[in-house]
Amino acid sequence: MSDASLPLAPAPAALPRASRGHLAFWLGALVLAGLLFFGLRALGNDYAYFAGYFILQYVVLATAWNILGGYAGYVNFGAAGFMAAGAYTAIALRQSTGLDLLPGILAAAVVGALLGLGTGYLTLRLRGVYFSIATLCLAVVLQTLVVNWDYVGGSRGAYVVRPREVAPFVSYGEYLFLVMLGLAIIAVGIARTVELTRLGRGLQAIRDNERAAEAVGVPTMRLKLVATALCGALMAVAGAPLPYYSGYLNPEAAFSLAYAVNAIAMPLIGGAGTWAGPVIGAVLLASLQQAATVTISSALNLWIVGWMLVIFVAVAPRGILGWFRRR
């Protein structure tokens, strides 16, 4: 038999190269997390943990929004509603069973995924501005339900009595920071996996031209439902530790406009449609907001976001990553 008649073997380096990329990402993330954690422990300032928690919370939230808004192009204005759903799920679980933070996060993920799946099934047939309005209405409906739900405090709010410390951590703030650090790594890892798989390519096809994607056989509705469930679960997970972070939560704080605005602004500034863009935007914007809160006033937070959006729309409409790629 001649060599020309032999079947071609698959390229042996393609899969190992992809596997090495995933392994490098997870190892790099763990090393960076370890350096950050032990660096803050060496610093010995408890406020640094709460500032780090604040930044990492927005890393999770922006990454979650990007799965549906960046990859699929469906702008979600209901980020505050999903975050509040996660926070009040954790409160309700604590009051009913006495379970602490970690079970509350798992319950919030389930509730957020189901809420996202149900919302997607009812609204994803709408396109453009109609879908965005529907998600905004969802947040309003959820806020109305929480305000009238006395079991979780209603309009009065709910207090969460947290322990002073959790062994082997030096303080509860350090414990909360480590939990949110783990959630941020998981969220970014999920977004990166989505981007590099068929799910991400299908969502990008939907974003570019949904009707053309349907014409070539892309299961658009199924992919959008998966993206909405992932987005809702991660947003709820970002909100689940919130009552433990603040010790008190009321509907006004849980459904804050800042969550909805930052969830959209951070991916756009960092570079929507990429797994790294929301991380860059969240670290940049949340750090600026935290610095303004400490030095001047927290009232400047949305003012900072507004000016940053104006600057980047004028100078780098594709975000920081898009600007570097173009250069």
Image (cartoon, rainbow, N blue to C red):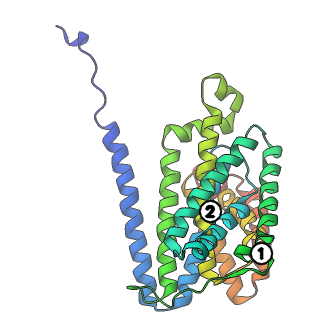
Figure check: 69 above or below 293:
above
Query: Which residue in the protein does label 2 denote?
Result: 236
Q: Quadrant of the N terminus?
A: top left
- How dense is the environment of label 1, judged by Cα within 10 Å: few (below 14), some, or many (20 and up)? some
Q: State the image coordinates of residue 40 (x, y, percent, origin top left).
A: 46, 84
Q: State the image coordinates of residue 89 (x, y, percent, origin top left).
A: 63, 67
Figure check: 212 above or below 44:
above
Query: Which residue in the protein does label 1 denote?
Result: 154
The kind of residue tagged 2 is: Ala
- The answer for how far apart the CA atoms under marks 1 and 2 are is 19 Å
Nearest the viewer among 162 and 210 is: 162
Residue for point 64% across, 73% down = 286
Regarding mark 1 in the picture, which secondary structure is present there? helix
- How dense is the environment of label 2, judged by Cα within 10 Å: few (below 14), some, or many (20 and up)? many
**View extreme (left): residue:** 1
Q: State the image coordinates of residue 271 (x, y, percent, origin top left).
A: 63, 55
Check residue 219 in the rendering and tell me which mark sits there, or answer none: none
Pointer 1 and pointer 2: residues touching (CB < 8 Å)? no
**View extreme (top): residue:** 1
Nearest the viewer among 223 and 97 is: 97
The kind of residue tagged 1 is: Gly
Regarding mark 2 in the picture, which secondary structure is present there? helix
Residue for point 67% across, 62% down = 266
Residue 75 at least partly seen:
yes
Residue for point 68% across, 64% down = 85
Q: Quadrant of residue 159?
A: bottom right
Sequence order check, earlier mark of 1 and 2: 1
Figure check: 12 above or below 99:
above
Q: Is residue 22 left or right of residue 313?
A: left
Q: Quadrant of residue 324?
A: bottom right
Residue 323 at least partly seen:
no
